[in-house]
Image: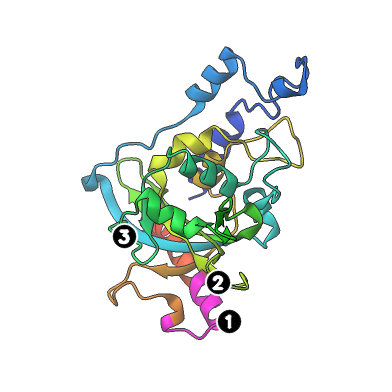
């Protein structure tokens, strides 16, 4: 497992990221963030596709569902900036990136939240009913209200931990991501709800083009895809695949300390598997 983490760290920091492209050469503010051809090509070359994994090479695997709470400081790069109108293109929250590409129909692999196995696809009309609210005043249709970055409180992710016997190491593959945000159909808008699942492999190249703000060094930034794939966030497990119909932890452990301890137990069991393999 340590080898896996070290390799990921090397890959992440090896990328040549462009924080605010062209800011020193811009003749006008509108030119800030525009990359030249060499920078565009460099970003394209730095994208790493998922490796093809033969099912026969998977010695052990486990599907894990986790929640990323945006109130935790480590997860702030996914949340901020919460004002979508402040920055044009050089700084965006994860939700703003997803929303813009959903509205532009660049993201289409979307699924209802009632099924976390990606078996219930949504149409563009279905999506708009979830993320926007249309109103009429005196018979005049107003501009639809669309969920903003400030309305997103967390993300759920679905992924698989597996032991690759060909490589001889434990690996992780992110499969899906679900934003949790304000229910705009609710009158007071205070209740959060699971919005929809997104098939993560279908949005990797989109997220690779958008950089995460680094408050330690603005000249050294990684993409949202690199952050998520290398698991540079804080999360807790709320469900795994199991014989009981993939029941959630809350269904057999009391909320609070018992659920937290069970989540940590499952996490330790997964991370210890690789070490146990070499001790057999």
Mark 3 or mark 2: which comes first in sequence? 3
Give 55 or 99, whichever is nearer the viewer: 99
**Label drawn at residue 256:** 1
The residue at 66%/48% (across/down) is 77
Q: Which-is-in-front pick, marks 1 and 2?
A: 2
The Cα atoms of the two marked residues, 1 and 3, are separated by 27 Å
| Magenta span contains residue 257 | yes
Q: Main secondary structure of the magenta part?
A: helix
Return the x and y of residue 193 as percentages of the image width and height: 51, 68
| As drawn, 251 above or below 118 | below
Left-right relation of 272 to 136: left
Span shown in magenta: 251-263
The residue at 26%/45% (across/down) is 57
Which quarter of the rendered picture does the C terminus lie within? bottom left
**Does the image show residue 230?**
no
Q: Which residue is mark 2?
A: 186
Give 142 or 139, whichever is nearer the viewer: 139
**Label drawn at residue 215:** none
The Cα atoms of the two marked residues, 3 and 2, are separated by 27 Å
Return the x and y of residue 26 as percentages of the image width and height: 75, 17
Return the x and y of residue 129 as percentages of the image width and height: 45, 58
Q: Which residue is mark 3?
A: 117
The residue at 27%/58% (across/down) is 119
Describe the colour scheme in one phrase: rainbow
Mark 1 or mark 3: which comes first in sequence? 3
Residue that protrudes farthest toward the bottom in the picture: 254
**Does the image show residue 200?**
yes
Tell me which corner region of the image, top left, top right, bottom left or bottom right, holds residue 256: bottom right
Give 34 or 66, whichever is nearer the viewer: 34
Mark 1 or mark 2: which comes first in sequence? 2
Return the x and y of residue 123 as percentages of the image width and height: 34, 51
| Magenta span contains residue 29 | no
């Amino acid at each position: 497992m340590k080898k896996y983490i070290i390799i990921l760290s090397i890959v992440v920091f090896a990328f040549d990221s462009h924080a605010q492209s062209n800011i020193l050469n811009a003749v006008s503010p509108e030119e800030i963030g525009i990359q030249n051809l060499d920078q565009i090509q460099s970003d394209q070359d730095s994208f790493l596709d998922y490796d093809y994994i033969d099912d026969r090479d998977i010695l052990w695997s486990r599907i894990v569902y986790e929640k990323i709470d945006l109130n935790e400081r480590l997860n702030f790069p996914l949340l901020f900036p919460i004002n979508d109108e402040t920055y044009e293109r050089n700084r965006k929250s994860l939700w703003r990136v997803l929303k813009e590409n959903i509205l532009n129909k660049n993201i289409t692999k979307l699924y209802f939240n009632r099924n976390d196995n990606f078996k219930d696809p949504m149409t563009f009309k279905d999506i708009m009913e979830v993320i926007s609210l249309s109103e009429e005043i005196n018979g005049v249709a107003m501009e639809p209200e669309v969920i903003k970055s400030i309305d997103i409180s967390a993300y759920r992710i679905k992924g698989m931990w597996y032991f690759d016997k060909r490589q001889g190491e434990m690996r992780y593959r992110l499969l899906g991501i679900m934003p949790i945000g304000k229910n705009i159909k609710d009158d007071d808008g205070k209740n959060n709800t699971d919005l929809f699942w997104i098939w993560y492999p279908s949005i990797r190249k989109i997220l690779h083009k958008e950089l995460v703000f680094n408050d330690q060094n603005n000249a050294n930034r990684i993409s949202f895809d690199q952050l998520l794939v290398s698991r540079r966030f804080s999360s807790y497990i709320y469900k795994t695949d199991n014989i009981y119909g993939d029941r959630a932890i809350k269904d057999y452990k009391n909320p609070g300390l018992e659920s937290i301890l069970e989540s940590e137990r499952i996490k330790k069991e997964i991370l210890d598997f690789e070490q146990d393999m070499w001790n057999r």
